[in-house]
Image (spheres, rainbow, N blue to C red):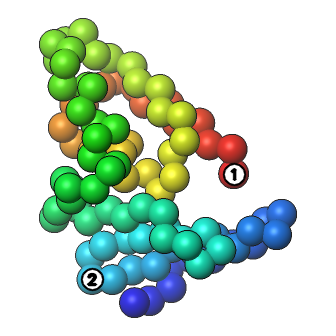
Amino acid sequence: MSLVWQKQADGVDYQVRRAGRTLRLYTNGVFHSQYNPARPVTGSVWDLLLVPAFFYPPAELQRILVLGVGGGAVIQNLRRFVQPQQIVGVELN
C-alpha cells in the first residue's frame, strides 16, 4: 500500500493510501472509507447512504446535500448512479 497524500492539522494525521486501484482514507491511522472505480458498491455500511436516492424519480432528484463527506465514496457513487445536477458536501474537518 502506498501513501498518496498526507496532512497534519490540529493534531490530526490524515492519510490517503492506494492499494491497487483502491483509495483509502485514514485518520490517525484509523481506516474510514475507500473507493475503487471498478467496484463502486462494496457491501459496506457506506453503500446504505446511497439507498434513499433510489426512492426518487430521476428527474426529481436534482440537488443532494451530504453531511459528513469522509473520503468521498458516497459522493462518487451518487455521481455515478444518480447523476444529480448538484452535490454539496459539508465536512467539519
Residue at the disc numbered 1: 93
Secondary element at image label 1 = loop
As drawn, the label of residue 30 is none
How many numbered marks, from 0 up?
2
- Nearer to the camera, 45 or 87: 45
Q: Is residue 69 left or right of residue 49?
A: right
- Image quarter where the N terminus lies is bottom left
Task: Please give the name of the residue rendered at 18% of the width and 25% of the height, measured from the top-left corner.
Answer: 54
**Farthest top residue?**
60
- Residue 30: x and y, percent? 55, 73
Residue under pointer 2: 20
Vertical arrangement, residue 27 with respect to residue 92, above or below:
below
Q: Residue at x 42, y 30 (%)?
A: 87
Q: Residue furthest front?
A: 45
Say which residue appears at 38% left-offset and 43% top-offset.
Answer: 75
Residue 89 in the image, given as x and y percentages of width and height? 52, 36
Residue sitting at the far right: 10
Q: Position of residue 73 (x, y in %)?
A: 37, 52
Residue depicted at x 26% and y 76%? 21
Res 39 quadrant in image: bottom left
